[in-house]
Image: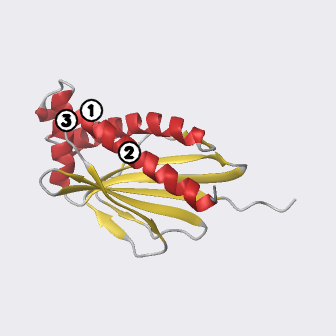
Amino acid sequence: MNRESIYHTCAEVLGRHAQDVILKMSSLTSTLGSLTLETGGATRSYAEGVKVSFKGQAHGEALSGYFICAFHVFKTAQSLASYIAVKLGLGPELAVKREGVENVLAELLNIIIGLTSSDWAKHGLEIVFDPPEKLGGHLIDPIPEGSAAYHLTLSLPEKREIAIFLNFLFQSKEPS
């Protein structure tokens, strides 16, 4: 398997786990609207997001990276957080304020991380994830050179979407 297909498979694994966890935690069915390999591009802006950074090795190659779960509209993040809070028995009021929404989304990503890291290991990626970082409204920088970047779109009911950005940054090897 070549480098690109390995990381594409890892992006698919992340998308599949995101779909499964969203269904289990909220009872909302999502579909993978798109999964594209991106190069370069402009800075993007999102109303709400949570970021998880990682580092490790893949097939003897050092790498780092991150994934971001982002929402174009805060109400979409708030709605998803409300569904999750209700399903977990925490009550919809938890998702009224931005802090509550970010906390619920961070917990959603913690569960996705656990499932994803296990499957990524099966594909040769030994990754250590940092805790989720709450971003609020933010910009996503252009893709750095020397990375493999994927954009996944999960479609929720009522024409709502979640954007997931996955970026693998390969570390250059130091001369001996």
- Name the N-terminal-most of marks 1 and 2: 2
Q: Quickly name the residue at label 2.
A: 16
Direction top: furthest residue: 89
In the picture, measured across the screen, residue 170 lies left or right of residue 107, that is right
Residue sitting at 45 percent across and 46 percent down?
A: 13
Q: What amino acid does circle 3 point to?
A: Ser
In the rendered view, tell whether residue 78 sits above or below residue 45: above
Instruction: Say what secondary structure mark 3 lies in.
Output: loop
Where residue 59 sits: x, y (%)?
A: 69, 49
Q: Quickly name the residue at label 1.
A: 24
Q: Are marks 3 and 1 in contact (CB under 8 Å)?
A: no
Q: Quickly name the residue at label 3.
A: 27
Instruction: Say what secondary structure mark 1 lies in.
Output: helix
Q: CA distance from mark 1 to mark 2?
A: 12 Å
Mark 1 crowd level (few <14, some 14–19, many ≥20, 10 Å Cα): few
In the rendered view, tell whether residue 113 sits above or below residue 160: above
Residue sitting at 20 percent across and 43 percent down?
A: 80
Where residue 169 sits: x, y (%)?
A: 58, 59
Q: What amino acid does circle 1 point to?
A: Lys
- Name the N-terminal-most of marks 2 and 3: 2
Where residue 36 sits: x, y (%)?
A: 41, 65
Where residue 68 sits: x, y (%)?
A: 39, 53
Mark 3 crowd level (few <14, some 14–19, many ≥20, 10 Å Cα): some
Q: What amino acid does circle 2 point to?
A: Arg
Total marks in image: 3
Mark 2 crowd level (few <14, some 14–19, many ≥20, 10 Å Cα): some
Q: Could you say which is closer to the camera, residue 57 or residue 12?
A: 12
Image quarter hosting the N terminus: bottom right
